[in-house]
């Protein structure tokens, strides 16, 4: 009999949907929170899942994203059922990997129509490729170097001191042996950006922020809008403050305003400037973003910025200020065909950052390394192996660099971190 997993924290609605499905001849499997639903899906492999959006601890969108990225559950059809009816919610659902979207309240006939259609078609939402515009460029292979001595713990300056606004032009990068902090106009910022959706760029950014802590305190800035994945992976949800609280900050403003917008879980150690869980009324302006990053760089040897896969003016400004850019590609053949096009647009931005392309494997049997390099016609700086325990680590809020520092994934990441 067809088994349909229902994930919703509202037990009355859970029971109502369960009755609808039972009367139609289906076997409902119930989960009252997102993490439990993920566990059931991975263990029992239901024929379909119906997922609510607004749940504590983890949103339905993040549940869909985790199920889509896990090879063992990626073929499960996903139906979002939510009271959120705004048009942009459909876009969020699609971006998260959901196949269909239904708003509450829903009638029995309408629900069954969507259920029957998805059971017939199967999972049909393929990750949307990144359009080849505004993507930075050429790469530089990793060359192993010795890790520097751990830096003393810096602190954000407590007094308001004016800081220079971001420069209008970026000077040419110096020779490779010069440290990034000496590059004129650039900040000790590491930008991490996926060249397609669902390639695990946020996962790499979170682990990168933790990995860089061996050289001193690090800070993670999540510049995604309306999708606070970094906070979810670090179990800092719901974020008490986000970059939205700094929309009106001006260069020279009290630096304590920026410091007070950070979240810090002492069990994790990394500081986080979180993304909002809902779309922001506007983006950070160029001057505001430049000032925020410059203040954070005064207190942290390295600042890791998680950038959205679709560039916007805010993320492009962050890329222009970064000393390093890490571009993440997946091991899905469908995504690789678009990478050369995005790389062809790299030079148009004229970034001065040292740039790396890395492979992040989200499935046990992805494209071979040689096929990746021949398709994109670019050197690859790091090849992150598939780790079956990655999803469990994210669910527990303990990224692999913390929970399994000796894993091949963690060692590959730390090798890259030593170059930054």
Image (cartoon, rainbow, N blue to C red):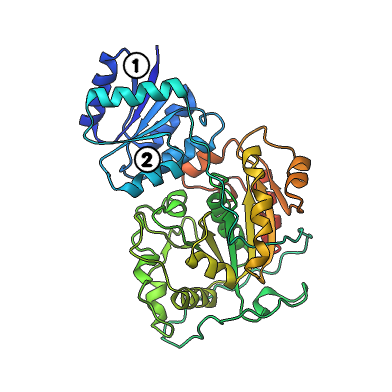
Q: Is residue 383 left or right of residue 93?
A: right
- Residue appearing at x 58%, y 59% in the figure: 133
- For the view shown, which residue lies furthest in the bottom direction? 162
Res 105 seen here: yes
Tell me the quarter of the image containing the C terminus. Answer: bottom right
- Residue appearing at x 57%, y 56% in the figure: 193
The picture quadrant where one finds residue 226 is bottom left
Give me the disc on residue 146: none
**SS for dot 2:** helix
The picture quadrant where one finds residue 25 is top left
Q: Position of residue 418 (x, y in %)?
A: 70, 62
Query: Gap in Å between the C-alphas at discs 1 and 2?
Result: 21 Å
Q: Give the residue at mark 1.
A: 27
Q: Position of residue 365 (x, y in %)?
A: 67, 32
Nearest the eye: 235 or 8: 8
**SS for dot 1:** strand
* 190 lies above or below 164: above
The picture quadrant where one finds residue 252 is bottom left
Tell me the quarter of the image containing the N terminus. Answer: top left
**Dot 1: within a 10 Å radius of its alpha carbon, few (fewer than 14), some, or many (20 or more) residues?**
some
Q: Is residue 401 left or right of residue 282?
A: right
**Dot 2: within a 10 Å radius of its alpha carbon, few (fewer than 14), some, or many (20 or more) residues?**
many
Q: Earlier in the sequence, mark 1 or mark 2?
A: 1
Q: Position of residue 197 (x, y in %)?
A: 54, 46
Res 217 seen here: no
Q: Give the residue at mark 2.
A: 60
């Amino acid at each position: 009999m067809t088994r349909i997993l229902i994930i919703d924290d509202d037990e009355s609605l859970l029971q109502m949907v369960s009755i609808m499905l039972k009367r139609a001849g289906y076997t409902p499997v119930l989960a009252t929170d997102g993490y439990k639903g993920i566990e059931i899906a991975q263990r029992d492999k239901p024929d379909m899942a119906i997922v609510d959006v607004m749940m504590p601890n983890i949103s339905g969108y993040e549940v869909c994203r985790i199920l889509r990225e896990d090879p063992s559950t990626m073929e499960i059809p996903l139906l979002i059922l939510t009271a959120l009816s705004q048009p942009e919610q459909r876009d969020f659902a699609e971006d998260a990997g959901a196949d269909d979207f239904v708003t509450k309240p829903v009638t029995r006939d309408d629900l069954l129509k969507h259920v029957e259609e998805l059971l017939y078609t199967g999972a049909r939402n393929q990750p949307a490729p990144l359009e080849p515009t505004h993507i930075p460029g050429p790469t530089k292979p990793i060359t192993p170097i010795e890790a520097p001595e751990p830096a003393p713990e810096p602190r954000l300056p407590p007094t308001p001191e004016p800081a220079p606004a971001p420069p209008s032009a970026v000077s040419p990068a110096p020779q490779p042996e010069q440290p990034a902090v000496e590059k004129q106009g650039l900040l000790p910022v590491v930008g991490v950006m996926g060249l397609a959706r669902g390639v695990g760029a946020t996962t790499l950014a979170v682990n990168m922020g933790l990995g860089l802590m061996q050289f001193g305190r690090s800070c993670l800035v999540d510049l995604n809008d309306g999708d606070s994945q970094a906070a979810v992976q670090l179990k800092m949800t719901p974020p008490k403050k986000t970059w939205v609280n700094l929309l009106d900050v001006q260069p020279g403003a009290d630096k304590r305003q920026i410091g007070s917008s950070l979240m810090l879980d002492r069990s994790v150690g990394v500081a986080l400037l979180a993304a909002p869980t809902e779309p922001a009324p506007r983006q950070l302006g160029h001057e505001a973003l430049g000032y925020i990053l410059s203040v954070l760089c005064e207190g942290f040897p390295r600042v890791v910025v998680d950038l959205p896969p679709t560039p916007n003016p805010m993320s492009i400004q962050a890329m222009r200020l970064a000393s390093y850019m890490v571009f993440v590609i997946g091991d899905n053949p469908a995504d690789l065909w678009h990478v050369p096009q995005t790389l062809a647009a790299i030079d148009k931005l004229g970034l001065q950052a040292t740039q790396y392309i890395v492979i992040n494997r989200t499935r046990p049997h992805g494209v071979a390394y040689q096929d990746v390099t021949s398709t994109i016609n670019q050197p690859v700086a790091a090849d992150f192996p598939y780790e079956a325990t990655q999803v469990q680590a994210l669910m527990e809020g303990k990224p692999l660099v913390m929970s399994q520092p000796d894993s091949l994934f963690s060692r590959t990441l730390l090798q890259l971190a030593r170059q930054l």
